[in-house]
Image: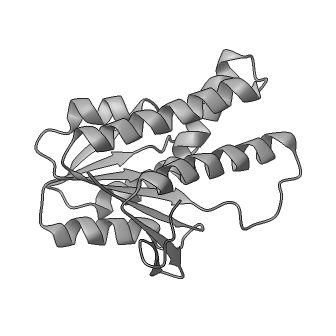
Amino acid sequence: MTSILLIGGARSGKSRFAQELALRSGKPVLFVATAEAGDEEMRQRIEEHRKARPPDWSTLEVTSHVGSRISGAIGGAQVVIVDCITLLVNNVFSQCADQTDGHIDAPLVERAVTGEVAELIQCFNRFEARFIVVTNEVGMGLVPDNQMGRLYRDLLGKANHLLAEQASEVYLMVAGLPVRIKPAGYLGR
C-alpha cells in the first residue's frame, strides 16, 4: 500500500500536484471527486475540474462511503486520487444535520467522520494502487467563532491526523510548492 497525503490551504496547489503525480506515473487513474454542487458557483468549479482532467481517467463522484465506493469502482486503476477530504467531512456534517433536523450531534458526526476515514484506510490496505489524498489544513487559521465551525475544524484535523499516520508520504503545499514532511525528518512514534 502506498498513500500520499497532500495537505495545505485553499488554492495552495494540492489538486494540481495530485494530478501531476498521477500523470507522471503513466498508470491508469481513478479520480474520486467528493464535491457536491450546492450552488451555481460550485457547479461551475466542478465543471472546470472535470474539463481539466485527462479524458482517459475514470471518475467516481461520491459524497460519502468513499472507501466502499472506490472498492466497487477501482477496476484496473493503479492510481487513485481522492479530492478531497475537506469536502467529504463537510458532506458528513450535512448528512448528519439532515438526520437530526439541523441540530448537530457532535458524537454522531465524529463517529461518521472517523468511520469514513477508517473505510478509506481499509481501502488503501486492500488494493495495490497508489492513493493520493487531498485535504485542507484548517488548524493554522483563526479559531472559528461558533461551535459548528470549531467542531468542523476539530474533526477535519482528526481526519487529517489519521490519514497522515497511515500515509507513506505527506506533503504540505505552500504557494504551489510541495514541502515533503513525511518521511523526511519524520520522527514517528
Residue 69 in view here = yes
Q: Is residue 2 above or below residue 123?
A: below
Q: Identify the image quadrant of residue 91.
A: top right
- Rendering coords of residue 183 (x, y %): 41, 71
Q: Nearer the viewer, residue 45 or 127?
A: 127
Q: Is residue 9 above or below residue 58?
A: below
Residue at 31% x, 44% y: name it.
124
For residue 76, above or below residue 22 = above
Please provide percent x and percent y for residue 21: 27, 70
Q: Nearer the viewer, residue 39 or 59?
A: 59
Q: Position of residue 136 (x, y in %)?
A: 57, 60
Residue drawn at point x = 57 percent, y = 53 percent: 161
Q: Nearer the viewer, residue 42 or 140?
A: 140
Please give left or right for residue 3 compared with residue 189 in the image.
left
Image side of residue 27 versus residue 165, left or right? left
In this rendering, position of residue 118 left or right of residue 99: left
- Above or below — where is 124 with respect to 10? above
- Residue 87 placement (x, y as % from top left): 54, 46
Q: Answer with the quarter of the image where residue 68 lies.
A: top left
Q: Nearer the viewer, residue 174 or 46?
A: 174
Residue at 30% across / 59% down in the picture? 51
